[in-house]
Structure formats: structure tokens, C-alpha cells
Image (cartoon, helix red, strand yellow):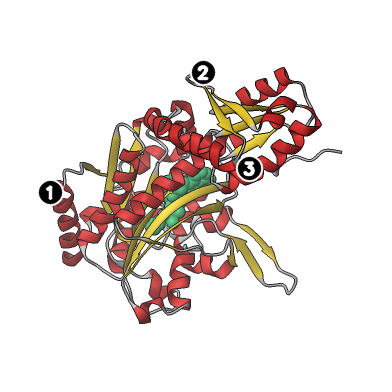
């Protein structure tokens, strides 16, 4: 009997992990530049957090959540996204009492019961930022700039920003009526989901991908044409600030995003490298969410991006092979004395910060050398009877093929490797 991963979940194998850590490092670096601090909410939350926070009528809540009862019959859910959790934490821990303005970021797995396909899975990974506590349009632009800077730093080409404003709660109410009027004569020919959405929340019709619904959606009026004076002014300030910073955008009046908490600014960033249909990342304002989840009225804005497809692109381009991925030293140990000495020496060298590995299978020299090659070890040291007896060995640089006589002490070997490290960092392969 063998076991497989659950459908839509997958292992990230050691060959791939380097790309993930490089991407995580880059997220952390950009977050540091803009002063966002990390928060790590739990993966399991009470279901109500999402049904209330994200909205019952959304596909995420209605169809895609992994929900189950705990032993006491309380309904729990594997988080499908992190904004609701971050806002819960903000309210639960009274972060607003200490400092109402908080800039936070997160990285971690999310769960949605979707049809698995390339780069889309049921356990997927997101990084995201949330800036809570200000209505300032320059904060919307900062959030967009963080997204753009990050994608740029990863070398993603052909970036384009889709931008819209869906206004305040009142504007959305009005816009829903505008949409109902538009769809009323068309809804009979549309999919069953849209017929339900028409009654529950016609905004959700705009996310529908069913071919039967596309013509009616494409002719629907845009939300940014139906904003109150305050929201219209907020939106024009966001646009002016984007233009000032040369962040080009395209207004898409029908971009409403699939989650109910959004207000005012919404955006998505797409890249030619990923194909235009699938957003690299998306976000927007959620000025009512803190209050909806029991906190004081507090605005917020943020975005999240999927890491899985990004890693696929990075892997294909081999853009992120980090030099730290390579092993510093492989000790080829021969005979009982050699193995014993290598085992002790490796421990001491690791304490000096040098990564070391050995062969634990008692194999001949040739096989051990081939293994060192497969690990892309930067250096190799052979330890046999004569080396143990003389207390000296030859350290071989596997890239330059140079050899160097070294004493068999942790200090002697680690300082020889430290001297070479400067050169490795320069060539960084
Ligand atoms: P979202 O648009 O649902 O927004 O997801 C953000 C990103 O996560 C998407 O653009 C996509 O890259 C990725 N993603 C979503 N579902 C999957 C999946 N099944 N497999 C792979 N990647 C996926 C949110 O989650 C909001 N919380 C964003 C936000 C933060 N808004 C304000 N603050």
C-alpha cells in the first residue's frame, strides 16, 4: 500500500525549494524597504470569520472553502486568504489601541477547493501586505508600488495594472441596481450561477467566466462611472499619484474582484510572462472590514499574490538559483580511519558555518566523487589512511580544478574555504 498527496495538494521537493526561499527573501526585502512588519496568523479559523468577512455570496465562501466541524461541533475552515485573519488579529489584539496605523505582511499557504490546473491548486501560497488605518490615496499608491517593485525586482516583464474604483457601500448599492437594470433583459440566457448572483449580488456576475455570460458582461456599465463625489475625488487622486510616479494603468470599469469586502480602489497586476488572463496579484481597499469584524471604523488597503505560478516562471527562467544552494565541501572518506576522521571533522567544520556532507554508504572513491558532483559541491577533500596519518589533505576546488594543501583541522579547512568564498560570490553560480 502506498499513499499519494490529496488532490490539489503537492510536495515542494528539494530541487524546487531554492526558488521558493529566493522568492520569500525578495518579498521580505521589499517589505523591509517599505517598513511592513511580518504577521503570522494561524491556518485554521472559525468559519464565520470568512463568511462574514469575505461574504456569503462569493465563490470563495460559497463553493471553495475547506470547512469541517471540530470535536465540539464548531465549524472551522482552512483559510482561503489572509486579509480577514489579519484584520481579526488587528481587532483581537487591540493593535489599533496601541497604534491605529499598522503596515503588515504575510507569507503562507491558503486553501481553496478549486479545479486544480497548472499553477492553480487547492493548497497554494500567497504573500501579501495590508496597510490598516488610513484613507490617504497615497497609501493606495504605496501598496500598488510595493507590488510593482516586487514584480520588477523578480524580472517579470510586460507588467500592466488594471485599476478601478467600486466606491463606498452606498455607491455599490446604487451600482447593483444599475447592473440589475442592465442584466434584467439578458439574465434568462445566462448561467444558473449568474441567475442566483442576479438576486444575491449582481456585482459577482462580473467575475463569471462562463462563455454564455460574456456578451452581457462586456456591455455592462462600469462601476467607476457611478461614484459619489468623495469616492470620485479619491479615485482621481489615486490616478494622479500613479501618473506622477509613472506607474501606468488601464481603467477597467468592470473589475470588481471576487471578494465582498472591497470598497473604492481595486486593482490587479498582470504580466505577459504569465499570460494575461491570470492575475499575478490583486488587491484593493476594504474600508468597512475592520468594523464588520467587530473593530472600530478603520479603513485598510492591501494586496496578495500567488507564489505557485511565479515559482513556475522563475524555475523556467532559472532566474533564482542562489549561490547558497551549493554545498561548500564534500569529504570523500575511505576506509574505517578515514570515515571516522571525516565524521568528526565534518561536525567541527559545520560549526564554523561551512556546509559539509559525506557519504554514509561506504562506497568506493569513484562513486563518492560522482555523488559530490551531483550535489554541485564547490570543494572536495579526500580523507584516506595516509591523510589521517599525515594530518594534511588536498582541498580541490571543483570549478577551477585548483588543489590546495590544507591541515586537517576545522580552522585550516574553513579558512581555506572562506578565502575562496569571495570569488564564488562574485561569479555567483
Ligand atoms: P485573490 O484575488 O483572491 O485576493 O487572490 C490573490 C492572488 O492569489 C491571485 O491573484 C492569484 O495570484 C493567487 N491565487 C488565488 N487562488 C489561487 C489558487 N487556487 N492557486 C494559485 N494561486 C491562487 C485575495 O486573496 C485578497 N486577500 C487580496 C487582498 C489583500 N486584498 C486586500 N488585501
Q: Which residue is mark 2?
A: 401
The secondary element bearing badge 3 is classed as loop
Depth check: 246 or 168 in front?
246
Q: Secondary structure at mark 1?
A: helix
Q: CA distance from mark 1 to mark 2?
A: 54 Å
Would you say the residues marked 3 and 1 are in contact, meaning their CB atoms lie under 8 Å apart? no
Specify the quadrant of the image occupied by residue 227: bottom left
Alpha-carbon neighbours of circle 1 within 10 Å: few (<14), some, or many (≥20)? few
Residue 387 found in image quarter: top right
Q: Position of residue 118 (x, y in %)?
A: 54, 33
x%, y% of residue 129?
Answer: 38, 57
Q: Which residue carries the number 1 mark?
A: 244
Relative image position of residue 20 (x, y in whole percent): 50, 42
Q: Is any part of residue 348 visible from this angle?
A: yes
- Which quarter shows the C terminus? top left
Q: Nearer the viewer, residue 338 or 299?
A: 338
Q: Is mark 1 within 8 Å of ligand 1?
A: no
Furthest-right residue in this view:
1
Label 3 beta carbon within 8 A of ligand 1: no
Residue depicted at 87% across the width and 38% down the height: 1
Query: Upstream in the sequence, badge 1 or badge 2?
Result: 1
Number of marks present in the image shown: 3
Decide if residue 101 is on the left or right side of residue 335: left
373 above or below 280? Answer: above
Q: Which mark is residue 232?
A: none
Above-or-below relation of 427 to 29: above
Viewer-proximal residue among 392 and 157: 392
Q: Circle 3 is placed at which residue position?
A: 8
Please report the residue visible at 44 percent of the width from the left and 76 percent of the height from the top: 91
- Determine if residue 187 is in view: no
Amino acid at each position: 500500500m502506498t499513499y499519494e498527496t490529496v488532490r490539489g495538494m503537492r510536495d515542494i521537493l528539494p530541487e524546487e525549494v531554492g526558488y521558493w526561499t529566493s522568492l520569500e527573501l525578495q518579498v521580505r526585502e521589499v517589505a523591509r524597504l517599505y517598513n511592513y512588519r511580518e504577521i503570522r496568523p494561524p491556518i485554521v479559523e472559525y468559519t464565520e470569520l470568512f463568511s462574514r468577512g469575505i461574504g456569503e455570496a462569493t465563490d470563495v465562501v460559497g463553493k471553495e472553502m475547506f470547512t469541517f466541524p471540530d470535536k465540539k461541533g464548531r465549524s472551522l475552515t482552512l483559510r482561503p486568504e489572509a486579509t480577514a485573519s489579519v484584520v481579526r488579529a488587528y481587532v483581537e489584539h487591540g493593535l489599533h489601541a496601541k497604534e491605529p496605523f499598522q503596515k503588515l505582511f504575510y507569507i503562507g499557504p491558503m486553501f481553496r477547493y478549486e479545479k486544480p490546473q497548472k499553477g492553480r491548486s487547492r493548497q497554494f501560497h500567497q504573500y501579501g501586505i495590508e496597510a490598516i488605518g488610513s484613507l490617504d490615496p497615497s497609501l493606495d499608491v504605496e501598496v500598488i508600488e510595493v507590488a510593482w517593485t516586487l514584480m520588477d525586482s523578480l524580472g517579470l516583464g510586460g507588467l500592466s495594472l488594471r485599476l478601478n474604483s467600486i466606491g463606498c457601500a452606498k455607491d455599490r448599492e446604487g451600482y447593483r441596481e444599475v447592473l440589475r437594470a442592465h442584466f434584467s433583459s439578458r439574465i434568462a440566457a445566462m448561467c444558473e450561477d449568474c441567475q442566483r448572483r442576479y438576486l444575491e449580488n449582481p456585482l459577482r456576475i462580473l467575475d463569471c467566466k462562463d462563455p454564455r455570460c460574456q456578451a452581457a458582461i462586456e456591455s455592462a456599465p462600469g462601476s467607476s462611472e457611478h461614484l459619489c463625489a468623495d469616492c470620485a475625488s479619491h479615485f482621481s487622486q489615486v490616478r494622479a499619484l500613479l501618473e506622477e510616479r509613472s506607474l501606468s494603468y488601464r481603467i477597467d470599469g468592470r473589475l470588481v474582484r471576487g471578494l465582498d469586502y472591497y470598497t473604492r480602489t481595486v486593482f490587479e497586476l498582470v504580466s505577459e510572462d504569465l499570460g494575461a488572463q491570470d492575475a499575478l496579484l490583486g488587491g484593493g481597499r476594504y474600508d468597512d472590514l475592520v468594523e464588520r469584524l467587530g473593530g472600530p471604523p478603520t479603513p485598510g488597503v492591501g494586496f496578495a499574490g500567488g507564489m505557485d505560478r511565479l515559482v513556475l516562471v522563475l524555475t523556467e527562467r532559472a532566474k533564482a538559483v542562489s549561490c547558497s544552494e551549493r554545498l561548500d565541501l564534500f569529504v570523500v572518506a575511505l576506509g574505517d580511519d578515514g570515515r571516522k576522521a571525516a565524521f568528526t571533522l565534518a561536525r567541527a567544520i559545520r560549526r564554523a558555518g561551512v556546509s559539509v556532507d559525506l557519504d554514509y554508504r561506504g562506497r568506493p572513491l569513484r562513486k563518492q566523487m560522482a555523488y559530490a558532483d551531483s550535489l554541485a559541491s564547490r570543494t572536495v577533500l579526500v580523507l584516506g589512511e595516509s591523510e589521517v596519518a599525515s594530518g594534511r589533505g588536498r582541498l580541490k576546488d571543483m570549478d577551477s580544478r585548483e588543489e590546495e594543501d590544507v591541515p586537517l583541522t576545522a580552522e585550516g579547512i574553513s579558512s581555506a574555504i572562506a578565502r575562496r568564498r569571495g570569488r564564488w560570490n562574485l561569479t555567483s553560480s
